[in-house]
Amino acid sequence: MTRVAWFNCSAGTAGDMTLAALIDAGADQSRVSEILAALPIDDYALTFERTQRCGVASTRTIVAVHHHDEDDHHDHHRSWRDIDAMLSAADLPDRVRDRARAVFSMLADVEGTIHGVAAADVEFHEIGSTDSVVDTVGVCAALEVLNIDHIVAGPIAVGHGSISSTHGQLPNPGPAVVALCAKRSIPTFGLDDHREISTPTGVAILAALADSFGPMPAITVSSVGYGAGTADFVSRANVVQVVVGETVADPSHGSGQAVRLLEVNVDDVSGEVLAHTIATLMSTGAHDAWVTPIVMKKGRPAHTVHVLCEDVRTSEFAELLVRETGSLGVRGSIIERWPVARTESTVDVDGQAIRVKVADHRVKVEFDDAARAAKELGLPVREVLRRAEQAAR
C-alpha cells in the first residue's frame, strides 16, 4: 500500500494552513517540532490551536517570531543560498531535506525569472522570513511523520484585484503564484475575493511536491485534517482540507498509476512522419507511444497515434501530437497502468556492452544494443540475445 495525501484547496492555500491541516490529520506535533529543531533558527515559537471556520473544527498554526531589536530586518532577507546552506547543514531526514529544497528551489527559479536575476541570487522577502521557512520545512516534516509517499492536490482557488507586497501593489493572484501554477499546469479557479487567498509559499509547496493534480484518488481514508487560515469568512470555511489514506493493492497487479492517454486520428500522414512522431514522443518522456491502423469515414485507411504520459504533461504532449501529425484535434482520457517492477543494468557479451531490463518473470534485452553487438561479433542477433539473457540471469 502507498500512503497518499490529497489536498483540497477550494478556499485557497498557504504554508501555515497546509502545516495545520497535516497536524489536524494526525501528524504528531512533538515529532514535527523535533525535526524543525535541527534548523539553525531559534528565534521563534511554534504552537497550534484548535479553532473553527464556518463551524468546521480545525487547527491553526501560530509561529511567533522573536525580534531582538526594532532594526533586525535580516529575518526578511534570506537568500536562496542562505536557505540552501541552512538545509544542507541541518540534521534533517533525507526526504524532509529533499522536499524542502524542492520547494525553495522552485520558488527561486520562479522569482528569478520574474525579477530578471539568476535563481541562485534570489533574495526571498516574505517567503524567506522565519515563519515561512518554519511553515515550509514543517510541512515536509509533517509529511514524513505521516509517512506520505504520494501527494495529489485539487484545483487551487485564487482571488482577484490587487495585493500589497514589499515591491508595492501587485495583481492578484500574484506573479509568483501564477508562474508556479503555469510551471506545473496546476488547475485553478477564481473566487470573488480581493484578498490573497493563495500565497506563493502555499502554492510552491504543492507545485514542487504534488505528484499530480485532480480529484481525490481511490484510497481507503484513514484520517482527515483541516488547517485554518487567519481570517474567518462568513461565506466559506477558510481551511485547507487534507485527506490521508492508503491505496489498496490489487493482489495480481499492485497499485495502479493514473496516467493520461492522448490520441489523434490521421489519414494523410506518411509512415516516415508517423515513425518520427513516435520517436519524438518517446524521447520527450512519454511512458509509451504507438500507432494502430484504422478505417475512417468513407472507407479511408488511416492511423491512430497514441501516447501515454503523466497527467501534468498533458498540454505538452497534446501540442507535440498536433505539431508533428498536423491533426486538427486531440482526445484524451485518464486510465490506469500497472508497470512491473524492474531493474536496468548492463551485461558483457564478448566485450560488447548490452543493456538489459530484469523483472521477476523475464529478462528483456535492448534490441538495438544486441543488433550492434551481433554486427561487431559476426554472430546471429538471436545468439547475442540468448547470451545477454543468460548473463543477466
Image (tube, rainbow, N blue to C red):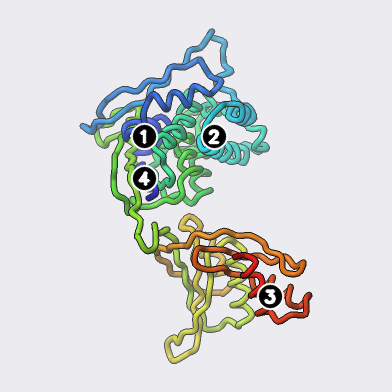
Q: Which amino acid does label 3 sit on?
A: Val
Q: Do the residues labelled 3 and 4 touch (CB within 8 Å)?
A: no
Q: Residue 6 carries which label?
A: 4
* Other-residue count near label 4 (Cα within 10 Å), few / some / many at <14 / 14–19 / ≥20: many
Please state the horizontal and vertical placement of residue 99, each as a whole percent of the image: 52, 38
Furthest residue toward left = 55
Residue at 57% in and 58% down: 343
Q: Residues under labels 2 and 1: Cα distance?
A: 18 Å
Choose the circle earlier in sequence order: 3 or 4.
4
Choose the circle earlier in sequence order: 3 or 1.
1
Task: Give the residue pinned by disc 2.
Answer: 97
Q: Which mark is residue 384?
A: 3
Q: Which mark is residue 22?
A: 1
Element class at badge 3? helix
Please state the horizontal and vertical placement of residue 196, each as a whole percent of the image: 41, 34
Query: Can residue 156 be seen in this snapshot?
Result: yes
51 w.r.t. 185: above or below: above
Quadrant of the image containing the C terminus: bottom right
Residue 351 figure quarter: bottom right
Q: What residue type is labelled 2?
A: Arg
**For residue 25, side relative to residue 348 (left or right):** left
**For residue 251, side relative to residue 119 (left or right):** left
Element class at badge 1? helix
Q: Which amino acid does label 4 sit on?
A: Trp
Q: Residues under labels 2 and 4: Cα distance?
A: 21 Å
